[in-house]
Image: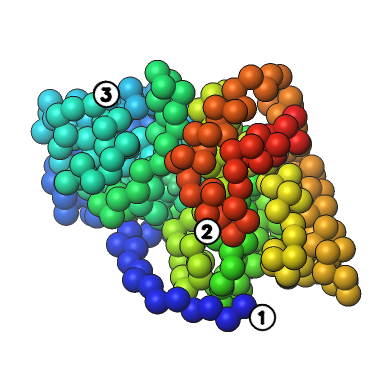
């Protein structure tokens, strides 16, 4: 039985505008914060879908400056470029239109607009964030939950690092969640998004103490992804599937699903960020490769009940032997990942060498509390896990 209900403080100050054409309400929200806006987007998907034109029309009464080309695994160089524009033009607010990478980049642009030095200093030490511009977001990919949380993950190619920064000033002021904007997301990114949403739940779910409300929320998000992930993968234009995935993505990473539970160490994310930092792979694909391996590696007397409960509540697997049930649940997860074309090995995403594994494992254990996780791991064990993904 899981009985814990720890004390907690919780606040998500982000206003959510959800549904088809919800964007119509955005200009009124933005007008509360001023007149000049930095519009930030990625490599051009919003131009292909027509969303760029829609946004420009809606912003006709604002002074709009632009930063385009934000990379997947956003670079600190893009953050610095955005912050410079904000300072130069005395910009009032930032509007991010895109996936998690654009949103994350914008969060730190908002912080760095008030910081004269390299934005990387803020990523390394978030206590240096003292003030932030208001951030508005229009989400185009259901995955990270960045639209509804206060975290960002930024890459620094010069140091081979990809690090998270969280700060209470980094919640978006308002996020537009229109599922129709995700209909153009490729099968690859749809699947990667599913793996990411599920991983956010696993990071909070495979912990020692939890409570019934929390477990129910976690199970529900996982079941939602299993059901609608496949439907969205088969038919990208299915509104119900896209809508369910979008809301699941927002709930999975903002902490609400784990209120009252013990804090997870985010082991899988700690290791994946190393893979993305060294090899620039898609975050969700890295997680999909690592997750089943990590689950099997950490299946023991302590965790077996959690994994068996996952098997039962998400996949309906009920076996008298808890270990058998747990293993069957992990297998069902692998089958789900395979059914939406996710990779199973590092080789499939182009990683053909093990030369950096030791450095990656050491860095992961330094930047995430992996040695204090529910199943604590040493850098040597992290290397072993990476080798099992090969
Ligand atoms: O750049 P564009 O042209 O927009 O194309 C993007 C990009 O190539 C494309 N895309 C996005 N929306 C689309 C679309 N293509 C067609 N139609 C659309 N509607 O998808 C590609 C990937 O986009 P990206 O933003 O990189 O994906 P995602 O949303 O998965 O974000 C991944 C980043 O978020 C971080 C990851 O580490 C990674 O850097 N994370 C952020 C978190 C947070 N803020 O809380 C938590 C997560 O665990 C994660 O670490
Ligand atoms: Zn993630």
Give the Cα distance between marks 2 and 3: 34 Å
Circle nearer the N terminus (2, 3): 3
**Dot 3, crowdedness within 10 Å: few (<14), some or many (≥20)?**
some
Q: Mark 2 points at which residue?
A: 264
Q: Residue 239, percent across and down?
A: 60, 54
- Residue 64, relative to residue 244: is it above or below? above
In this rendering, position of residue 122 left or right of residue 218:
left
Q: Position of residue 375 (x, y in %)?
A: 63, 56
Indicate the quadrant where residue 387 lies.
Answer: top right
Q: Which residue is drawn at 62% across and 61% down?
A: 206
Q: 51 and 312: which one is in front? A: 312
Q: Is mark 2 on a helix, strand or loop?
A: loop
Alpha carbon of mark 1 to alpha carbon of mark 3: how far?
51 Å
Mark 2 → mark 1, Cα distance in angstroms: 18 Å
- Give the percent coordinates (x, y) of residue 359: 54, 27
Residue name at image x 82 percent, y 69 percent: 322
Secondary structure beneath dot 1 equals loop
Q: Quadrant of residue 164?
A: top left
249 horizontally vs 290: left or right:
left
| Tag shown at residue 386 | none
Of the pair 201 and 51, the residue shown nearer to us: 201
Marks 2 and 3: CB-CB under 8 Å?
A: no
Q: Which of marks 1 and 3 is in front?
A: 1
Location of residue 78 with respect to 176 vertically, above or below: above
Please say whether residue 280 is visible from this viewpoint.
Answer: no
Residue 81's disc is 3
**Mark 3 and mark 1 in contact (Cβ < 8 Å)?**
no
Q: Which residue is drawn at 33% across and 59% down?
A: 14
Image point (70%, 64%), residue name: 303
Dot 1 corresponds to which residue?
A: 1
């Amino acid at each position: 039985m899981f009985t814990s209900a720890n004390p907690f403080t919780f606040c998500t100050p982000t206003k959510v505008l959800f549904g088809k054409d919800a964007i119509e309400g955005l200009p009124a929200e933005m007008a509360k914060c001023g007149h000049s806006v930095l519009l930030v987007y990625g490599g051009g998907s919003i131009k292909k879908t027509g969303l760029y034109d829609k946004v420009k029309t809606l912003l006709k009464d604002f002074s709009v400056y632009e930063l385009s080309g934000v990379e997947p695994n956003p670079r600190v160089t893009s953050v610095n470029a955005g912050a410079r524009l904000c300072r130069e033009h005395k910009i009032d607010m930032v509007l991010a239109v895109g996936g998690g990478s654009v949103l994350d980049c914008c969060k730190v642009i908002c912080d760095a607009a008030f910081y004269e030095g390299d934005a990387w200093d803020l990523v390394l030490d978030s206590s240096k964030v003292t003030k932030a511009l208001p951030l508005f977001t229009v989400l185009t990919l259901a995955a990270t939950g960045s639209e509804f949380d206060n975290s960002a993950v930024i890459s620094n190619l010069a140091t081979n690092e990809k690090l998270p920064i969280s700060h209470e000033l980094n919640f978006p002021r308002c996020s537009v969640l229109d599922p129709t904007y995700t209909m153009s997301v490729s099968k690859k990114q749809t699947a990667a998004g599913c793996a990411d949403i599920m991983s956010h739940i696993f990071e909070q779910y495979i912990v020692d103490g939890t409570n019934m409300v929390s477990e129910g929320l976690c199970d529900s998000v996982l079941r939602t992804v299993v059901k609608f992930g496949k439907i969205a993968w088969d038919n990208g234009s299915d509104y119900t599937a896209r809508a369910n995935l979008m809301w699941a993505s927002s709930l999975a990473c903002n902490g609400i699903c784990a209120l009252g539970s013990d804090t997870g160490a985010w082991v899988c994310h700690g290791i994946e960020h190393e893979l993305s930092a060294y090899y620039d792979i898609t975050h969700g694909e890295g997680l999909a490769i690592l997750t089943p391996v990590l689950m099997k590696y950490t299946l023991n007397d302590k965790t077996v009940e959690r994994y068996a409960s996952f098997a039962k509540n998400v996949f309906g697997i009920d076996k008298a032997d808890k270990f058998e049930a747990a293993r069957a649940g992990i297998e069902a997860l692998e089958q789900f990942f395979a059914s939406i074309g996710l990779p199973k090995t590092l080789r499939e995403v182009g990683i053909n060498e093990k030369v950096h594994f030791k450095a990656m494992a050491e860095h992961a254990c330094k930047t995430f509390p992996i040695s204090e996780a529910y199943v604590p791991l040493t850098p040597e064990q992290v290397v072993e896990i990476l080798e099992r993904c090969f």
